[in-house]
Image: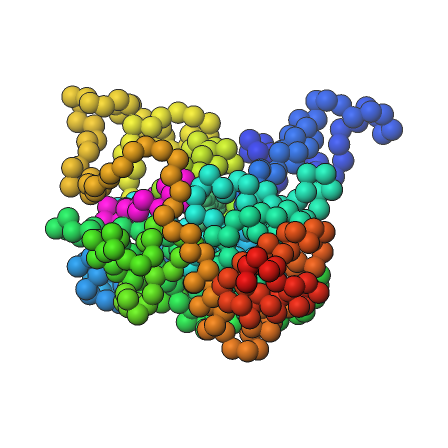
């Protein structure tokens, strides 16, 4: 007798025939009473869920974070960072931004670097990128920006006209696009890229002291880029190149790791620092605020099921544990809304009950019901608060720190319009070889743009960052830097 399990329906009913549907006679029509056939077809029709509106293509793995510095509790009371040697289980997902679920990995695009720490005080998510900066600095511009990265409404094609129209009219993007068209714009693998929190966050210690913090996850494999021509070839031949590389490395026991460093910025410095600390298009100098080692992240286990664990994973900048708080960065504030909202749409209101998203600690909330409640729904325990029934209560020690605000409520622009110094510094930091590749990448990307006005406006931005930068892109495009810019 075979020791194979008997096939069942979703309801666990043994299936008698999985090859032939029930028909009226050998050549007759199919009977609607074949409930196994009906269920099989209907379930199949519902296999796809909405893909992420951005960062649709990605891959993930489990691992741990271990603290290597005993001094971190000076800056934050976050329990998982409290002492050297402390380990916290993690899940990480890496992704491209603009492409759809089936798109190629080796494109020029930022890479998502999303981390979930299953801490003793609930899940902490750090939803960063492999670049320390971003294209825009106010969430109100994000949907417009992403529309330009996706497909043209008429042609259904990627469209450089939209891309460069938007970027040339949004000079705050110059820093990020200079980063993106350089050697780090296409990572060799997900293992060979750094991760950044990008925004400034706030840490609060046990005494209530507040600090601003920037996160840098530095790849222990080193940072390596992919040659542009090889990337194009791989995009055709092995579009899942980065997914495959991470999976294989972990399967072979070649566990990738990253060392986490932070820059700690005294609270009062935000009033006087030369750059707006809450402007995500700017970096904070390592000379002003040196990096301090915090710990190591190691990825050592592949998911058992890609859909269940990677596709259904849900990260949000709104998952912050005591001791870690947002800064007033306008982008970060917008993101705190956006992610939970999209999870409710993409996965449903009870997405936090899905195993990959479920905290390792007990959940004691008064939330009840909703589609797909699978956690017992609180049983007969009280579902309201305040109550006299010994239900869970708040803990004032876990309250977010108070901070001062001032000014009038208004649609206010950032104070600084210097979009040029930092990208210019980045250009000047590059070797001559890298500069040559950078300007070529820009020219190749901009060449198909139909309007010279758009190209010239963008060349003006390059020129303002560094005259040589502007002149070189202009020359490759057969144009001249506009006189008005010089
Ligand atoms: C206001 C600006 C932004 C908005 C509104 C926004 C919105 C979104 C949305 C709706 C998703 C899909 C989430 C999902 O379906 O699970 C997403 C994914 C993601 N975003 Fe953003 N985003 C913004 C800026 C940023 C920035 C600045 C970063 C990095 C510093 C970033 C990193 C990511 C990452 C890594 C993912 C993928 C998460 C995953 O792997 O599931 N986003 N974003």
**In the image, is 449 to the left or to the right of 222?**
right
In the depicted view, which residue is nearer to us: 82 or 47?
Answer: 82
Count of numbered marks: 0
Is residue 307 depicted above or below 176 in this figure? above
Direction bottom: furthest residue: 432
Q: Nearer the viewer, residue 120 or 456?
A: 456
In this rendering, the answer to whether 20 lies above or below 226 is above
Relative to the observer, which residue lies in front, 29 or 295?
295
Residue 329 covered by magenta stretch: yes
Q: Position of residue 263 (x, y in %)?
A: 29, 62
Residue 113 x, y percent position in the rendering: 45, 56
Tell whether 452 sits left or right of 292.
right
In the picture provided, is 483 more to the left or to the right than 367? Answer: right
- Which span is picked out in magenta? 319-336
User: Looking at the image, which residue is at 64% across and 55% down?
Assistant: 455
Residue drawn where x is 24% and y is 52% of the image: 271
Instruction: Report if residue 101 is visible in the image.
Output: no
The quarter in which the C terminus is drawn is: bottom right
> Is residue 77 rendered magenta in the image?
no
Residue 361, image x and y in percent?
A: 29, 44
Residue extending farthest to the right is 27
Identify the image's colour scheme: rainbow, by chain, secondary structure or one colour: rainbow
Identify the residue shown where x is 29% and y is 27%: 366
Q: Quadrant of residue 390?
A: top left
Q: Is residue 466 visible?
A: yes
Q: Residue at x 33, y 28 (%)?
A: 367
Q: Position of residue 328 (x, y in %)?
A: 32, 44
Residue 44 picture quarter: top right
Tell me the quarter of the picture where residue 421 sits.
bottom left
């Amino acid at each position: 007798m075979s020791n194979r399990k008997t096939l069942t329906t979703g309801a666990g009913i043994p299936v008698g025939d999985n090859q032939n549907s029930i028909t009226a006679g050998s050549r007759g029509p199919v009977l609607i009473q074949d409930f196994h056939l009906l269920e099989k077809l209907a379930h199949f029709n519902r296999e796809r869920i909405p893909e992420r509106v951005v960062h649709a293509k990605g891959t993930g793995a489990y691992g741990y974070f271990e603290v290597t510095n005993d001094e971190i509790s000076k800056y934050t009371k976050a329990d998982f960072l409290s002492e050297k040697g402390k380990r916290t289980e993690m899940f990480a997902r890496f992704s491209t931004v603009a492409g759809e679920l089936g798109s190629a990995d080796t494109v020029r695009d930022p890479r998502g670097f999303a981390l979930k720490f299953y801490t003793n005080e609930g899940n902490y998510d750090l939803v960063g990128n492999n670049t320390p900066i971003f294209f825009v600095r106010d969430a109100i511009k994000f949907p417009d920006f992403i529309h330009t990265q996706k497909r043209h409404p008429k042609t259904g094609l990627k469209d450089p006209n939209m891309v460069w129209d938007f970027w040339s009219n949004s000079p705050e993007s110059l820093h990020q696009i200079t980063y993106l068209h350089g050697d780090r714009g296409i990572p060799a693998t997900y293992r060979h890229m750094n991760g950044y929190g990008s925004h400034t966050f706030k840490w609060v210690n046990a005494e209530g002291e507040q600090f601003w913090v920037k996160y840098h996850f530095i790849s222990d494999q080193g940072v390596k880029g992919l040659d542009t021509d090889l990337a194009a070839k791989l995009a055709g031949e092995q579009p899942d190149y980065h997914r495959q590389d991470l999976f294989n490395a972990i399967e072979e026991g070649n566990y990738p790791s990253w060392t986490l460093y932070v820059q700690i910025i005294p609270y009062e410095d935000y009033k006087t620092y030369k750059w707006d600390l809450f402007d995500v298009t700017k970096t904070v100098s390592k000379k002003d605020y040196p990096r301090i080692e915090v710990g190591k992240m190691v990825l050592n286990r592949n998911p058992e099921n890609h859909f269940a664990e990677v596709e259904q994973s849900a990260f949000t900048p709104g998952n912050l544990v005591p001791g870690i708080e947002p800064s007033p960065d306008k982008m970060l504030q917008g993101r705190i809304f956006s992610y939970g909202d999209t999870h409710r749409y993409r996965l449903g209101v009870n997405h936090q009950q899905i195993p990959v998203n479920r905290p390792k600690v007990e959940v004691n909330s008064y939330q009840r019901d909703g589609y797909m409640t699978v956690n017992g729904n609180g049983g007969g325990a009280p579902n309201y608060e305040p109550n006299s029934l010994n239900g869970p209560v708040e803990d004032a020690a876990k309250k977010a720190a108070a901070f001062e605000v001032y000014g009038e409520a208004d649609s206010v622009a950032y104070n600084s319009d210097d979009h040029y110094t930092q990208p210019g510094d980045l250009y000047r930091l590059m070797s001559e070889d890298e500069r040559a590749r950078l300007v070529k990448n820009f020219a190749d990307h901009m060449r198909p743009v139909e309007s010279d006005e758009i190209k010239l406006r963008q060349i003006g931005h390059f020129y303002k960052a560094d005259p040589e930068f502007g002149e070189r892109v202009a020359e490759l495009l057969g144009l001249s830097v506009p006189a008005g810019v010089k």
